Image (spheres, rainbow, N blue to C red):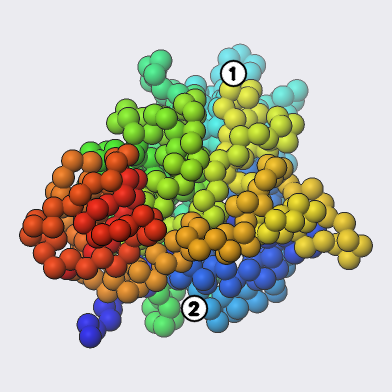
Amino acid sequence: MTEPIQRPWWQDALIYQLYIRSFADSNGDGIGDIEGIRSRLGHIASLGADAIWLNPCYPSPQHDHGYDVANYFDIHDEYGTLDEFDQLVAEARDHNIKILMDLVPGHSSQDHRWFRAALAAGPGSAERDRYYFRDGKGADGSKPPNNWQSAFGGPAWTRINEDSDDGQWYLHTFAREQPDFDHTNVDVQQLFVDIFEFWFDRGVEGFRVDAVAGVGKHPDLPDQPPVGPDVGVLDITWVNPYIAFRPEGHEAWRRFRTAADSYMQRHPERELMMVAEAYAVRRPEIIKAFTEPDQFHQMFSFDLMLTPWEKASIERAMQDPLAILEETGVAPAWTLNNHDIQRIVTRLGREDAHRPESWTNNNLALSRAGVDTDLGERRARAMASLIFALPGSLYLYQGEELGLPEVFDIPDDRREDPVFERTGGAEIGRDGCRVPLPWDDDASSSYGFSVPRPNGSVGEPWLPQPAGWGAHSVATLEGIPLSTLHIYRKLGEARTAYATNQPLTADPVELGAGLVGVRRGSLLVVVNTTTEAVALDMNNPELADAQLVFASEPDEVDTPDMIPPNSTLWFTT
Ligand code: GLC
Ligand code: CA
């Protein structure tokens, strides 16, 4: 018997990302809610989750579905109440599941009382200092203070009170309904300390911290240098040297860490964590800077999420995160999906998914190549079987365990993502990965998403579900022995049995053309990225006395030395 390895829970945790609006609706209004989560905790527990990361559920006018927070100290009324939230924390704890909240430090909602007060207070006021208010350019101030572009398309500035003397502009890195906070302001600094105390006191164990790349700005707000024609409309912000990855941001993260550490000193039984979200693919220096010991505990590694289905690219995607782990001891936060990115089944099912150059096609901008979702689902299982074995924590996005594809047939007038509107429809946005989950095959209750109202009626789900959605439902997949749902559950079990009891290290292993090999202690994982079954060389010393313990396509494995196409095997040696 090996001794269980002692390390902070979050270093090697399985975390279920829960997009509350689309998870489960308990009162038939077509919008997911906290009671819905409580009624489905068993499902999350069945995957072996250690924690839930809850997308923002604070009061919000929902212009960016909660990423526009009007009040950081309450629950959005469509989702429930603080009491219900407290009960969720308690019930989740009964399942050994912790709750992480989503913290949005970069901006508030335009409906936040501070922003309203700033509008009322006028130029030069203390109220305006909490945000970035500036006079416009030109004789009448009718031109924006600089040329910055918003990450959702369009200018990053909006003018207020156009017809009065007070025609100032305010900065918003995202939508105009999301005014940016100025973290050099002491009120803003104190606000975030108060937020931490408030939610830690309620039993929240940490935060996913949103969009850290854009927090902190060059103090002079200079014009952005010209960008090349190859920079996509949604990327202009992220190549703006005065917005993206500014040193000023790190001052804020140090204050955040101090707040969390101070709480833990006062509550030594707690093990709090914060994971930073920013797209730092192939930029290990950035991940290192954000996970200095005085800043975030972890930062997402999006490399594997965005990689094409090809040996060298997958190896490359693991390289930086694993090198950082070896160098600094900071374990990666792996993920294959989230609420901002096309679902992996669709991405890896594309005809061009195996081309190394499709790295760039796999971001928010759509590759138009045809999609084979059966193939994509198979590759998604194979990829999940890789990340479940790796050292570090892993974040599953709701619906991934059902093999959900991206939904494209959403009518324009039902699209909700501000990206769609702000780009004039040039980018369809992120609604397709946010469609409400199917729980059963009953179309009359939105496939089990909604519990009918007392009079038996069911409101339209907030985003339309495609016909046949029930084929992906939990109830349907329960009845199919080797469905993606069952494979994910088996993966969770295999992870506990063979992966998390290993050291926090992993090394690439060369096993042959088209095969990605990784060793973690006595666990050896092999991914076959080719379209053919491949014979493993059992004389390779890496495979000496290898015992097959998991397969992503178990019904196709006749002998352990033949690895089926587009699949993954786990061996212990
Ligand atoms: C992050 C979130 C995204 C949101 C944006 C602005 O990227 O994941 O959903 O729109 O930040 O807050
Ligand atoms: Ca509801």
CA separation, marks 1 and 2?
55 Å
**Amino acid under disc 2:** Asn
**Residue that appears at 56% across and 75% down:** 92
Q: Nearer the viewer, residue 434 or 114?
A: 434
Label 2 near label 1: C-beta < 8 Å? no
Quadrant housing residue 94: bottom right
Q: Secondary structure at mark 2?
A: loop
Q: Nearer the viewer, residue 322 or 262?
A: 322
User: How many callouts does the rendering have?
Assistant: 2
**Amino acid under disc 1:** Lys
Task: Point out residue 436 in the picture as x, y percentages from the top left corner.
Answer: 66, 51
Q: Nearer the viewer, residue 396 or 385?
A: 385
Task: Point out residue 567 in the picture as x, y percentages from the top left corner.
Answer: 34, 50
Quadrant housing residue 154: top right
Position of residue 113 in the picture relative to residue 212 (left or right): right
Q: Earlier in the sequence, mark 1 or mark 2?
A: 2
Q: Is residue 364 visible?
A: no
Name the residue tied to disc 2. 96
Position of residue 175 in the picture relative to residue 336 (left or right): right
Q: Is residue 467 above or below residue 102?
A: above
Name the residue tied to disc 1. 143
Q: Residues within 10 Å of mark 1 (few under 14, many from 20)?
A: some
Q: Which mark is residue 456?
A: none
Task: Point out residue 16 in the picture as x, y percentages from the top left corner.
Answer: 50, 62
Question: Please, which residue is most extreme toward the front here?
Answer: 558
